[in-house]
Amino acid sequence: MGMAFLSGDADFANWFNQYGRDNFKLMKIIACNSNRPLAEAISAYVNLPLTKASVRRFSDMEIFVEIEENVRGEDVFVIQSTSYPANDNLMELLVTLDALRRGSARRVTAVVPYYGYARQDRKSGPRTPISAKLVANLITEAGADRVLTLDLHAGQIQGFFDIPTDNLYAAPVMSKDIEERHGGDELVMVSPDVGGVVRARGLAKRLNADLAIIDKRRERAGVSEVMNIIGDVEGRRCILIDDIVDSAGTLCNAAVALSEAGASAVSAYVTHGVLSGGAVARVTSSPMEHLIITDSIMATEAVRVSHNIEQLTIAPLIAEAIRRISDESSVSSLFD
């Protein structure tokens, strides 16, 4: 039952027809409003219709949730990224979890492909919050029995939860796409800052590629950052690796630095495409050949029409993890 395959392929279909229908009878998937297309794709991969639920607002924007099917004694998965508008989407998730707990669901898993507030994972100064921990407490108290998420900004956030938490990795999806696009090129995986070295090194190991690091330094206030590149990038295709792209300033500055250092081409693979403010315009005018993001966050219209921003789907990865959680088989073996 713990076979290593992604849902949606022939092996998954054969497994589902032979073993899966009985397991899925007591499983339900509910979609909130933050990323309906991803929820529908996950539902299609496991061949299980989304549970009917109404997530709506009163005239004063107060959130109201009604689960329109019986969930008593069932294994329920709630899919909701806490992306923009972060507070509204977080509140939708919390109210839905409470509705399921009061509806006597046997187990409720919060599937949070993008975990908002993750960048507030420590005290950054005096009298500042650790909001990632606060959000973990809220999700737990609202009624979640476990959490499934993707590429947490900091791995230790798993420890903020007092319930089982599975942190999936987008690296297998990214490495497959990189091999298909650039398999014949001389590749260098690049971390845009020192903090992301572990992530870039992991992908470099998967692809048997070299690693480079960009060290940013600001000598004094009011002086522009100096970017020192550690590693050999001249004449090679450089691929920037990160977990979140928000304003895209760091990523675009890194792309410029690599181009000036003689890189033959620069692209980027980032798990969560927050892309707020003028980020899309910044990426469009940058030296990056393309920026590849996953669909953990629903694409805006600006992202959809951009000529050098593309999305990879993580629906098969999450669907397979959901299946494994439901039938109590190994999730970690997905990455063996």
Image (tube, rainbow, N blue to C red):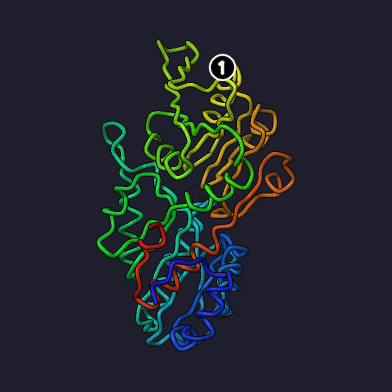
Residue type (three-letter) at the residue carrying disc 1: Ala
Report crowding for label 1: few under 14, some 14 to 19, many 20 or more residues within 10 A (C-alpha). some
Q: Position of residue 272 (x, y in %)?
A: 52, 47
Relative placement, left or right, of 95 versus 181 is: left
Question: Quick check: 29 above or below 215?
Answer: below
Which residue has dot 1 on it? Answer: 261
How many numbered marks have been drawn onto this rendered protein structure? 1
Write the residue at 74% across / 45% down: 305
The quarter in which the N terminus is drawn is bottom left
Of helix, strand and loop, which one carries label 1?
loop
Question: Quick check: 126 above or below 164?
Answer: above
Give the quadrant of residue 329: bottom left
Question: Quick check: 38 above or below 206?
Answer: below
Q: Position of residue 18 (x, y in %)?
A: 50, 86
Write the residue at 53% across / 23% down: 233
Relative placement, left or right, of 211 versus 137 is: right
Front residue (pair 103, 186): 186
Write the residue at 45% across / 38% down: 204
